[in-house]
Amino acid sequence: MSTPQAIYETDGPLAVLTFNRPEARNAMTWEMYEALAEACDRADRDPAVRVLVLRGAGGKAFIAGTDISQFKSFKTAADAIAYEERIEQLVDRLERVTKPTIAQVQGVAAGGGCVIALVCDLRVATPESSFGVPIARTLGNCLAGVTFSRLVDVVGPAQAKELLFTGRFVGADEARALGLVNRIVPGDGIDAAVRELAAQMAANAPLTIRATKELNRRLMAARRLPAGADRDLIELCYTSADFREGVAAFLEKRKPTWEGK
């Protein structure tokens, strides 16, 4: 389904899902996450669709993570586990879509937005784009094990730890060097560049592309933590006073005060 916050369109072999909250830098609401899963279902059901593109409206952000106001209701460990499990189900759906996916990144891809870009098969960015998971600076939560595995798969363990320890963002050139980005193109040409890339892919044998994508997914999945192996760490972070402080500080637009408890 298309919604005001997530618009699904098709043009020949190309399907495009546009995250449409530019006033909030396209921060993800539950409605937008569900629209992402539905877009994957629609792309899989439609034999005319050969490539699925994800993009953010407004040109300033791809996705600036999850809408932090949704964390204010968190009170128990069960809330944290349920949240991470739900996010993983939705991200896993994106990873399993049978059509190749392209993240068209203009501006920032932060937190959950960086994760969504990582899960796409290819990433095309502009020189102004940046990528990061700044949770050590902002919220004081943690990545789920499968999500962390995906980051390690792309950039390696040392770089993944450095990015998370510092909470810094990397620009497009560094992101390309790390393997986060496939191509960098000017902002005014990114739509055309992504369509050209999608057309090249759509012209090739779809079953070969599907098999290649699934082989890669199975290989990466075999290296990941088993379900539930991260539960103690999710509970540790999400039920902490630091997490409550991080959420409050983010919403109040101030720097958090960390106490390590």
Image (tube, rainbow, N blue to C red):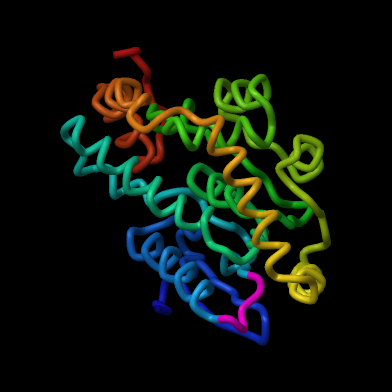
Q: Is residue 212 left or right of residue 253?
A: right
Indicate the position of residue 80 as horizontal and vertical percent values: 26, 36
Q: Residue 148, relative to residue 38: is it above or below?
A: above
Q: Can residue 60 be seen from the camera position used here?
A: yes
In which quadrant of the rendered view does residue 152 lie? top right
Q: Residue furthest bottom?
A: 12
How many labels, in total?
0
Residue for point 21% across, 39% down = 79
Pick the residue in front: 124 or 63. 124
Q: Is residue 253 left or right of residue 57?
A: left
Q: Can residue 138 be seen from the camera position used here?
A: no
Q: Residue 205, relative to residue 90: is it above or below?
A: below
| Numbered range of the magenta stretch | 47-51
Residue for point 33% across, 59% down = 30
Residue for point 66% across, 57% down = 211
Q: Is residue 27 left or right of residue 154?
A: left
Indicate the position of residue 241 as horizontal and vertical percent values: 25, 22
Pick the residue in front: 200 or 107. 200
Pick the residue in front: 192 or 44. 44
Membership of 66 in magenta stretch: no
Q: Quadrant of the C terminus?
A: top left
Q: Main secondary structure of the magenta part?
A: loop
Q: Is residue 205 left or right of residue 24?
A: right
Q: Quadrant of the N terminus?
A: bottom left
Residue for point 47% across, 35% down = 146
Membership of 50 in magenta stretch: yes
Indicate the position of residue 41 as horizontal and vertical percent values: 45, 70
Q: Residue 239, relative to residue 198: is it above or below?
A: above
In which quadrant of the rendered view does residue 59 lie? bottom right
Q: Residue furthest top?
A: 260
Indicate the position of residue 220 as horizontal and vertical percent values: 59, 38
